[in-house]
Image (spheres, grey):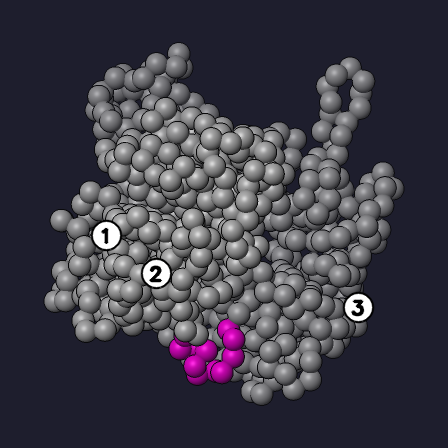
Amino acid sequence: MIKKLLVSFLFVLVSVVGVKASIDNWTLYPSYHNATYCQVFGDKVYVLASGALFSYNISDSEVRTYDKITTLSDTDIAHIRYSSFINALVIVYSNANIDILYEDESVYNISDFKNKSLPNKTINNINIQGSTAYLSTSFGIVVLDLENMEFDNTFNTGFNTYCAYLVRGKLFCGTETGMYSCDIDKNMLDKNNWVKKNNYFTKAICELNGVLYCHLYDYGIYSYNDTLNVLKDVVYNSGEKYDYVYSNGKEIIASAKKKTAVITAPKEVTVYKNVDSNFILKDGETFWDCKGYTGVVQCEMNGNEVVSVSTPIVPNCPVRNYCEFMKFTNAGNLLVAGGNINYLGEVKYNHAGTLMEYRCKDDKWFNFPEDTIKKLTKLSYINICSVDEDPTEPGHYFASSFSNGLFEFRNGEFIQQYDFTNSIIESAVPNSRAWVRVPFATFDKEGNLWCLNSDVKDVVKVLKKDGTWSALEYKDLDYMATMAQLYVDSRGWMWLTVLQNEPGLFCAKRNDTPFDSSDDITRKWLNKFTNQDGVSYDIYQLYDIAEDRDGAIWVGTNIGVFVIDNPEKFFNDGVFKQIKIARNDGTGLADYFMSGVYIKTIEVDGANRKWIGTNDNGIFLVSADGQETIHHFTTENSPLPSNCVESIAINDVTGEVFIGTDKGIASYRSDAIASAETLAKENVYAYPNPVRADYSGNISIVGLTHSCNVKIVDAAGYLINEGVSNGGMYSWNGRNMRGEKVASGVYYVLAYDSGGRESVAAKILITR
């Protein structure tokens, strides 16, 4: 998908629009924020950011994004390099897949190395010399012939290799333990023919005007005389290590966070100051500075400094690909939190304070402030595990942290942080503001905020809408380490989950006094699951619970799905149901539904179907009773960024299912939405309408009641299509009963509720 970005250097602000890529029913929402590397190719600067790729056109200021839907073959890019020999960009993914991106945006995929059965295929670096690309890997060097698009050789040296360079009949490689070389006329497959040249971590090797340069990571850049085996210093690290060293054919460039060295000869070195740089590319007199989450910036030399001459270039997108929690607001905006719960106190991500909102109607991402919070609170601001919007005040949010308590926002601005210093929220470690564990916070309909507070005596705290606090006492849960989820079901019962360490499920059948737990009708705590056949299980991790539209509670664990189909009975026997799927092979036997599958998240759509996200097997859509698998999406058969699904959120208005993976967010436009209570003519409509000749997707009829009977007829009254709605939606593929595309004309939708008491009509215009 192409979006425009207007930039005028020095004078005009950057105007960035939302970036997403979609095809058929799928849409991707990758992050392009963390710019770490770039290459100039023709009129474009190609930027590697957050493992994704975008380009900026220098001549007309256009920004293009590239991903698995629009252009590329895979996700999670590790390296990009430009090859002048084929006039194309070589793209290497973290799984060792390789794409060749040409100027006309066609792509040639090379998957041989990816498909190799090897214990470790990590590619640390690429060096392109003429028609050859040298891939430095965890086990040695792999040679790719760019002329014939095939792998030429593999040199399994046993060295974790960071760079490779061919010069004067020798192939050099750099490793953490030193630099090695081998004459190309010798058997390079024989490890004994590789001669060690030094004992220093050699991260880069390059050449300029016949002089070989070595980047000794712990010391600096040195020239190297192979005949004498002598290193001579060119530029020292001087306190800060250089991250990247490369040759552009005219100079050697060494870049670090706060400085850039330009080397034209061993004794001709100029060092410039720069700020917060991940990588600097020098193209003539122009510098392109990859400044991480700020984006990429055009720069020039000013005295002894590299200074910006443009505003940062970064598409509107999620700030990071972290999405362990997702939830829709009443207004249909998607809230995303990127932290994690871990009773050992470990932080899974480098920047787990991630908090974002996707405003669907405007196709805009808003990323909540981070640096200002750290400055104001003097806290690390990490592990944001959940977020919710006040139903009584749009724009008023609370986000919970598994490290730093509770954070309040209003209209995008940080308001206040809550912990033991200003509330009844407690710390797992007395008087430590770094151990205030609030893994979950959610509003009820009245605007009271319900919070879980792990590792303390009273794990449930409530910030009431009048601004006062209450604590609820549940002795079974005192000092539980990983409280994970609080859910109040349609009956008003409160369900609490413990993720790990002592995983289990708790339910309180409450009275009409929600802030007083002393008069609860009954309670149940289970940390061992027993099914209807008497089989007992020890649960290692309990990830998610969801209530379906029949009131049943579905529970996702590391060993499969369990169902409480009669919660009233559950309080007596504590037995879970495992759905049985008949084998239909004549044996009369059945298997437990998704038994042994590592489940991380469950959501229920408008048709009461279940979307089930797994740890390593993608996402399943199953029928309301779990008997039928309708879809099973993985990275192999869909644009899903990863098979590890962390979270799911469903937009009940549009039917779009947002899928949060460990490598970013995708969405799938489903054929089910929440059903209407009654059929109303003003609420029933079809989209797209009119249907243009170039449209090939389904036509959606929405605003229907549950299990609504739908008939589509032509202008003469002949039946074209019929069926039953999924929740509040009916999808028609624009074909007749024989599977043929219908002709241009007006078609009428006749909808009747399941009881035959109400009916409405709508019309659809189709042009071919």
Residue drawn at 27 percent across, 50 percent down = 209
The x and y percentages for residue 694 are 24, 27
Callout 3: SS: helix
Any part of residue 604 in sight: no
Residue 620, picture quadrant:
top right
Say which residue label 2 marks.
254
Number of the label disc, if any, that sits on residue 250: 1
Q: Earlier in the sequence, mark 2 or mark 3?
A: 2
Disc 1 residue type (three-letter): Lys
Answer whether residue 248 is magenta in the image: no
C-alpha gap between disc 3 and disc 1 = 71 Å
> Does residue 490 appear to the left or right of 273 in the view shown?
right
Callout 2: SS: strand
Q: Toward the viewer: 437 or 746?
A: 437
Disc 3 residue type (three-letter): Asp
Residue drawn at 70 percent across, 53 percent down = 542
Disc 2 residue type (three-letter): Ala
The x and y percentages for residue 366 are 35, 62
Say which residue label 3 marks.
476
Quarter of the figure with the C terminus: top left
Q: Nearer the viewer, mark 2 or mark 3?
A: 2
Depicted 562 relative to depicted 333: above or below: above
